[in-house]
Amino acid sequence: MLLICLLGSLNSVQAAPGRHPVWSVGYHEMTFLDPLDLQPMRAIAFYPSSDREHMSLLEGYSVEAGEDTKVAIGRFPMLMLSHGNTGTPLALHDLATSLARKGFVVVAVIHPGDNWRDHSRLGTLSNLYGRPIQISQAITATLGDSMLAPFVNADQVGVIGYSAGGETALILSGAQPDLDRLRRYCQERPDDHDACNTQGELIVDREDLQPVADPRVHALLLMAPLSLKFGRHTLADVHVPVLLYSGDGDKLVAFDKTLPPSRASCPPRRTSNCWPGQGTSCFWRHAMKSRCAPCRRCAPMLMESIARIFTAT
């Protein structure tokens, strides 16, 4: 399930020199304007805390984090988290809090128009191109947040993308979606109702939008990425390290249709493995404390790999 592609050089990212203390986790809710329509949107930032342990209930999830607890002293790398279509980043709360304990600030963005409560932008051009712009706005908002900004290193920013969030992350790093690839895929697999609910034709609701990369993004972690729109030529401008995870039992994000384009664009030196028999839901259903045996067995490897791609060792 592991594919590491070093597509360029990564600025040194280090949460703290040497061994860090045992941190708890805090969370901080932020509201800022959606750049697409200037309406309020939300993000939840998880961060290392020097306070005692807390347990909170967030939108039905029991999360090991306390609201606005004291931020640990340091300048921490920041990871933006982009969820899948009609999803919520809180489904990955165990991953977010585990990373926070390791010295990362993880900003979980709720995408307007494409989350578990609101599907109004699903299948539209504004969703494809708007999601990356929303992540960029969340980066700016976090760097301007009076509570978090003093503890975040603005030169050490990465993006975690799950499913459609992987598509978002790729655009942020310079990838250019090829909409013809989606059309061809849907002609071949018309029964894929998740990817082809509009028969491979995105609704053109905003002709003014284009894919916009963000030069502040220095590394990506992609988990079961929705990459149907990306072939080798579309990734030519991606020059950041990419850590890619998927499962060969994925029935939602087809393994054979998403990994080969990325694989073909990697340099010759790479490591490729797969979680046998696992699918998309394994990433969020049990997350880091999974009862799913492969997830539980590979959790230490996952954390080690993330640290390697996003931090200097």
Image: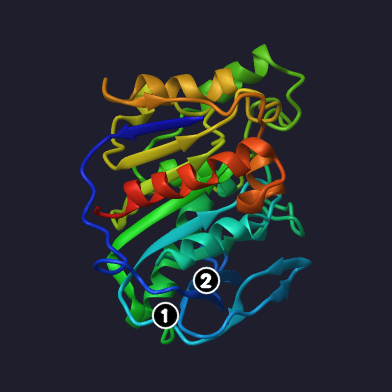
Q: Give the quarter of the image for residue 198.
A: top right
Query: Where residue 235 sits in the image (x, y, percent)?
Result: 35, 31
Q: Is residue 232 left or right of residue 269?
A: right
Numbered badge on residue 45: 2
Q: Tag count in the figure?
A: 2
The amino acid at mark 2 is: Ala
Asked if labels 1 and 2 touch by Cβ distance under 8 angstroms, the answer is: yes
Residue highlighted by disc 1: 148
Of residue 23 and residue 212, the one placed in the foreground of this image is: 23
Does residue 202 appear anywhere in the picture? yes
Crowd class of label 1 (few under 14; some 14 to 19; many from 20; radius 10 Å)? some
Above or below 285: residue 264? above
Give the SS element for disc 1: loop
Residue projecting furthest to the top? 188
Q: Give the quarter of the image for residue 234.
A: top left
Above or below 17: residue 238? above
- Whichever of callouts 2 and 1 sits on the residue coming sooner in the sequence is 2
Query: Where residue 179 sits in the image (x, y, percent)?
Result: 52, 28
Numbered badge on residue 40: none
Does residue 163 appear anywhere in the picture? no
Q: Residue at x 59, y 29 (%)?
A: 247
Above or below 177: residue 136? below
- C-alpha distance separating marks 2 and 1: 9 Å
